[in-house]
Amino acid sequence: MAILVCAEYQGQQLNMASLQALSAAKDIKAHTATDLVVLLASSDEALLSAAQSIEGVDQVIGFSGDTSALSLAENLAPTIVSIIKSSDISHLVSAATTQAKNVLPRVAGLMDVAQISEITSVVDQETFVRPIYAGNALATVRSSDQLKVITVRSSAFEAADTQGGSASLSIHSDIVDSGLSSFIGETLVKSDRPELASADVIISGGRGMQNGDNFSLLENVADTLGAAVGASRAAVDAGFVSNDMQVGQTGKIVAPNLYIAVGISGAIQHLAGMKDSKVIVAINKDDEAPIFNVADYGVVADLFDVLPELNQQLSDRN
Amino acid sequence: MKVLVAVKRVVDANVKIRVKPDQTGVDLSNVKMAINPFDEIAVEEALRLKESNQASEVVVVSIGQANTQEQLRSALAMGADRAIQVQLPADHSDELTSLTVAKLLKAVVDQEQPELVILGKQSIDSDNNQTGQMLAAITNRAQGTFASEIKIDQGVLNVTREIDGGLQEVALNLPAVVTTDLRLNEPRYASLPNIMKAKRKPLDIIEAVSLGINLAPSITTVAVIEPAAREAGIIVPDVATLIEKLSAEQGVI
């Protein structure tokens, strides 16, 4: 029996979220005494070797040749299915990235099993905790399926150690091309700032920012703190910033050490995305804004006064 | 081109839900219900395809008991042509898994043969984000999930998808399945005359048990609890105090 973890990468780096999902897989492994197998849709030797070094991994499955077809769910899902059917897989696990959200339910559908989405803890090998209703309730659920397909809310787990492992490598050469779809292109937002999903500090803006240009005030503070910049759905809906910055129930779920909410009222959909942050700061001129009910520290003042002052004082400290 | 849109009856997005004291679930008695917001976006997109003469008919489908007809009538009032209710037995109380929902929808797809199925990417109650992908899998169709723009061009569906790092564009062969993200469109409100008209639009009922699909879930809920509440902190008088707290007391900067 084995737990199969679908890992992802960007450039030459394994995704932090995948390393966190690996910790969830290790928690499952603690109940089942089984092998931990990492699947990486890449033929890059350095990347595969990095996956082999992850602590606790028994086997890495990589590919040979051109793996570009695997960027599409219509091809990756049946490829994963063929691996599951040729091995003895009890759990299929991946971080709940947009890629896994796209692909894993397709795998589950092809395998005729249910999926358990965005688990935040492992009770035993068939029982998991997951948030429902935008995190306003926590459900403990038990699966009776032979194969358990699971996505992991990565912010709930520590990253697995990238060193200390010596996994074996096997190359899967059979890439399914379903011919159902084709990849046209990607427009990725380039930023020198940390990624939202793995940043230690996040500063987010809401409707109170008034327009997209004013987000430069947040960016200044972010650059001083080495923070990522996020946004509420209201700010995205109003067209201030792009959707990949959205923190919330249907955007990104984050749990940094410090989350600074600026001009964000605190709708439950936004709280769902950030309320597990270690320390929350709210800056809002409306002292009745619900964000203050979850904030450790509140500043009741005009954000256009506070942000320049905050940036100045932080810069002076450095 | 026929478009099928799946809608789900869920708790209204503005309702603050309560967990039942016996930990069996969420208390849904006397709570305002609505079409799942992402499904409303799906209905809107189908209507726009029809208004631009790219779709010939918009059919909405929902799975549930008699009260789900309220949401189907809402979708008809927005402008859908007809509705199908896949009716669950009156005594059915288990929550369907997304896989079961996908299988029931497949039965409707087999019957209706739509070239395009549009669903919300996620329902705001169970937060699963699975049904569209599973339906695409079991009907062997291409899938365009988390769509922020769709365009049909000579039998090919171009979908712009919201992904973690930005946007991705894919081309899908038809027939296909699309799931909606927030920025795809802004759904319209139904006008009063259209609400009246919707009452006379056809609404067919298919008994779920007649479809030969096992409704028993492979996932059971052991307990539902309220998450630990975060306590409100303190209001600090100025920025200097804030920085002092964050660095000296919390050590986060």
Image (spheres, grey):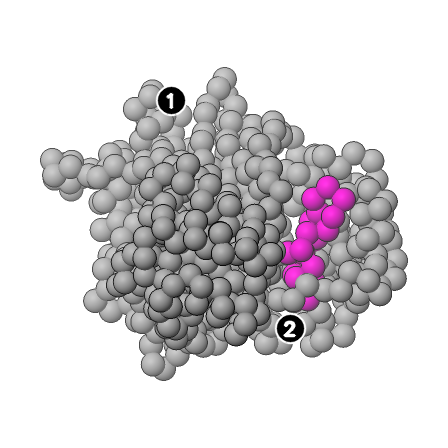
Chain bearing tag 1 is B
Location of the C terminus of chain B by quadrant is bottom right
Classify residue A93 by image quadrant: bottom right
Q: How far apart are marks 1 and 2 (CA)?
A: 48 Å
Q: Residue at horizontal 71%, vertical 75%? A: A30
Location of the N terminus of chain B by quadrant is top left
Does residue B99 appear in the picture of this structure? no
Q: Secondary structure under badge 2?
A: loop
Q: Is residue A53 left or right of residue A133?
A: right
Identify residue type, mark 1.
Answer: Gln
**Which sits in the foreground, B248 or A73?**
B248
**Which sits in the foreground, B34 or A278?**
A278
Q: Secondary structure under badge 1?
A: loop
Identify residue type, mark 2.
Answer: Gln
What segment is highlighted magenta in the picture?
A6-25
**Which sits in the foreground, B146 or B73?**
B146
Q: Is residue A14 magenta?
A: yes
Q: Residue at horizontal 64%, vertical 73%? A: A125
Q: What residue is disc 2 on?
A: A125
Chain bearing tag 2 is A
